[in-house]
Image: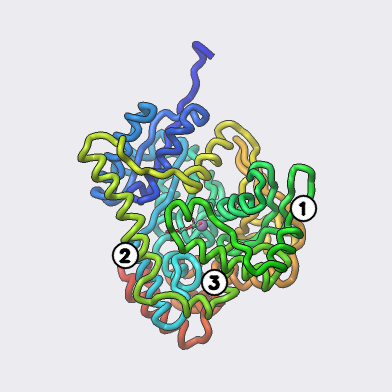
Amino acid sequence: MEGIFVKKNKFVIVGSGSSYAPAIVAVLLQRRTDIRLGEIVLYDIDASRAARTGRFCELYAAENGGIPVTYTTDIEQAFRGADFLFVQIRPGCNAQREKDEKIPLSHGILGQETCGLGGFSFAMRCIPAILEIVGKAQELCPDAWILNYSNPEAMISEAIYRTYPKAKALCICDMPISQEETIADFLEIPHKELTFRYFGLNHFGWFTHIYDKQGCDLLPALRERVLSDSTVRLVNAEAVEKQDNYWGEMYAHAIEGFRAYPEFFPLVYLSYYYFHNQIVEDMNPEYTRANYVMDVREKVVFEDCDRCIAEGTTRSSALHAGVHGNYIVDIANAIINDTHERFIINTMNRGAIGNFNHDAVVEVPCYVGAGGIEPVSVGYIPQFHKSLMEAQKGYEKLTVEAALTGSYQKALQAVLLNRTVPSYAVGKAVLDELMEANKGYWNELY
Ligand code: G6P
Ligand code: MN
């Protein structure tokens, strides 16, 4: 290769003040040769958050590969010349997430960042912000690939693909692969030796088959074990390592969901709909996931950053790179090296699910290469799943409409289509309270 010019890639993390950013940087550095890493730019609108993770990552990179890392609040400087934008923003940070979770719970319905009306509220904040970012990218770095992790991905993907159909944007979520890895561990087979078939919407999907290298579908045997043994548990290794019991409970509910509807293995998030009342009863309306994230995860990561910055070295860092960072870098690698690996991605349906709206974003396996994605044809899906998805999709599309048009009517219609909303009175009351709590974040509804 000597003498041949090899283009190095510029990666930008948008929303780099997040506690997830250092782990993504760590994976980029680990994979620097494969992905021809040239530089990393960390971009955030909040200068002090940008500086904390930014200074940590600068030091970390200097000690782990010597790749230049800079941080900035200047979008032009960040985006010009970019090859990849990794977007993971949270307008209003976890303080607004806390309101999204607590307001619905105070009315007796699910309070969660992506499902139920918490997800609606988050979408109303995030859609305008994400469209501004993708718009700027079209202007400043139109050839860059945009890999979006921002939530609620179901509605963010609808908004991006509808507004910028030509953008090189892929909307991704690490939940399906995290669940695949958990199932693979349970089956005691390396994840790479299994091929999972799957369909659905983001945080609303099902695994239909699990093929091994011999072409044998292991889902029926898994079903058999779950149905015949009430002690079966799925253990997510990463959550155990982080002592984060939330995922243990989520997987327990997913097993219950598989027992209740044994046709396909549900994504863990479906439990919020399958077992809404039971889960809400078990939630503490005074202390939600956002509180845990702020009190534990953010605290651990940010204290780690502060300490290392003070020490002038990251040698004592407890930085943990897991599925979140690996997944997004794996997808970038598949594009850069044209690997045609298979990943579950949110994409316009266009026939991938034969009997579902073709103009709707769905979450399906796709082959990924230098030319982008090729969705796998899933065929026809059963009536039950199709109907659940249709109602959910109606809610998602109306939420996007409400965010884009500012129509209160559309917002109310969206809310009333959500499965967690039991009545007009509850839906409207929660909508009005969320609207009040999000002044300055949502586009005004009229
Ligand atoms: C999974 C989901 C993400 C979600 C995250 C929540 O990774 O795929 O969409 O944001 O879990 O994690 P947290 O620890 O913030 O509750
Ligand atoms: Mn997700």
Is residue 165 left or right of 48 when viewed as pictured? right
Is residue 63 left or right of 108 when viewed as pictured? left
Element type at mark 1 = loop
Q: In the rendered image, which quarter is residue 434 located in?
A: bottom left
Q: Amino acid at mark 3?
A: Tyr
Residue 17's tag is none
- Residue closer to the observer: 319 or 369: 319
Residue occupying the point 55% across, 47% down: 166
Q: CA distance from mark 2 to mark 3?
A: 22 Å
Total number of numbered labels? 3
Residue 272's tag is 3
Of the two numbered discs 1 and 3 in the rendering, the one whose residue sits closer to the viewer: 1
Q: Position of residue 283 (x, y in %)?
A: 44, 75
Q: Is mark 3 within 8 Å of ligand 1?
A: no
Disc 2: CA contacts within 10 A as few (<14), some (14-19) or many (>=20): few
Looking at marks 1 and 3 on the same chain, the residue that comes earlier in the sequence is marked by 1
Q: CA distance from mark 2 to mark 1?
A: 44 Å
Disc 1: CA contacts within 10 A as few (<14), some (14-19) or many (>=20): some
Q: Which residue is mark 1?
A: 217
Q: Tell me the quadrant of the picture where the C terminus can be found.
A: bottom left
Q: Position of residue 48 (x, y in %)?
A: 23, 49
Q: Position of residue 28 (x, y in %)?
A: 45, 36
Task: In the displayed orientation, state which residue is furthest to the right.
Answer: 215
Residue 95's tag is 2
Q: Amino acid at mark 1?
A: Asp
Residue occupying the point 47% across, 46% down: 322
Element type at mark 3 = helix
Residue occupying the point 30% across, 44% down: 53
Q: Amino acid at mark 2?
A: Ala
- Residue closer to the observer: 349 or 255: 255
Looking at marks 2 and 1 on the same chain, the residue that comes earlier in the sequence is marked by 2
Looking at marks 2 and 3 on the same chain, the residue that comes earlier in the sequence is marked by 2
